[in-house]
Amino acid sequence: MVKIESLKTKIESLGTSTGKIINRSEDYPDIFHLPVAEIMDLFRTSGILLFKGFGVTHNQMKKFAELLSSNLVEDYVRPRVDEDQFIHFVDPGMGDLVVHSEHAYSPFRPDVIWFCCAVPAAQDGETIFCDGLQVWKELSEETKQLFLAKKLNFVYESIPSEIFKRFISPDATIADIKLMLDNLEGVTYQINQDESIRMEYACSAVVKTKYGNYDAFANSLLPQYAGAGKAAFADGSLVPDAVIDEIKKVTDKLMGKISWESGDLAMIDNSRFMHGRREFNDEKRQIFSTLSNL
Ligand SMILES: [Fe+2]
């Protein structure tokens, strides 16, 4: 494991979490001077890194993500920046976003979500985060048993085939899409008459972390519940409201936040940490994201 002392800069804790803030220093005038092996070591144990003072732009975020990842992952939901396939504007709107793991409602969940800030909101608009490892430890035994016994279920009535082509190739056929879907765990589907796809995705709310293979409550349950006013398990039963309340209580208690400054870069382990956003009221706020696998 890396000794923090071997990094020639000030490392601070990110609030009370295991996350770390890595500050710019004379030895590391920009992020590309940082030693990749040491940074990855630190990331494995801390789960969130916040790079401060480096003045990171969205293009640098992408380059740095490429350097540390095996591949970048296209975000099929968010609008692209400068037509770049891998740099995106974060979720539109200014409202609260409850904590979730990125794309955990689909079989295309990336290992890491990266955020960089060009313009912070004048007030509020922090990115919030919660360590799924801690959440899992704090949930009641009864709730844990429920999530170990039952899978969450996400239903999509009509996904355009174009979305799936992005994961194969632009000229992929329906047969190619079927072949891909047949090989994805938790997926059941039907091809609609207009060649869109009805898909159900069943997955556990508790996942194994990429590093250490620990149990983590890291999923997309809360946004699903917030959006529909209910969330169903794969067996058709509903997640009880009392369980949702318990999750909210535990996640609220463990919540950390990133108060953005221009040029900040965050790297979040999506197999362990959930993230969200606090409400704000400032149209100038500009945060970008990139997804990658390690
Ligand atoms: Fe997100």
Image: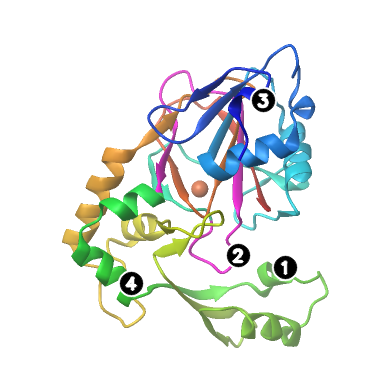
Q: Which residue in the structure is indicated by mark 1?
A: 167
Look at the image and give the residue range highlighted in magenta. 103-131
Residue type at mark 1: give it: Phe
Relative image position of residue 242 (x, y in whole percent) = 16, 60
Mark 1–mark 3 distance (CA, rounded to whole Å)? 40 Å
Mark sitting earlier along the chain (3/4): 3
- 160 on left or right of 254: right
Query: Do the residues bearing badges 2 and 3 touch, measured as CB atoms within 8 Å?
Result: no
Q: Which residue in the structure is indicated by mark 2?
A: 108
Mark 1–mark 4 distance (CA, rounded to whole Å)? 30 Å
Residue type at mark 4: give it: Leu
Mark sitting earlier along the chain (2/1): 2
Relative image position of residue 253 (x, y in whole percent) = 26, 39
Badge nearest the viewer, 1 or 4: 4
Is residue 16 among what the camera can see?
yes
Query: From the Cβ of disc 1, is ligand 1 less than 8 Å away?
Result: no
Query: Do the residues bearing badges 2 and 1 touch, measured as CB atoms within 8 Å?
Result: yes
Q: Which residue in the structure is indicated by mark 3?
A: 6
Mark sitting earlier along the chain (1/3): 3
Mark 3–mark 4 distance (CA, rounded to whole Å)? 40 Å
Mark 2–mark 1 distance (CA, rounded to whole Å)? 9 Å
Q: Which numbered dot is residue 148?
A: 4
Badge nearest the viewer, 4 or 2: 4
Badge nearest the viewer, 2 or 3: 3
The residue carrying pointer 4 sits among few (fewer than 14), some (14 to 19) or many (20 or more) residues within 10 Å by Cα, namely few
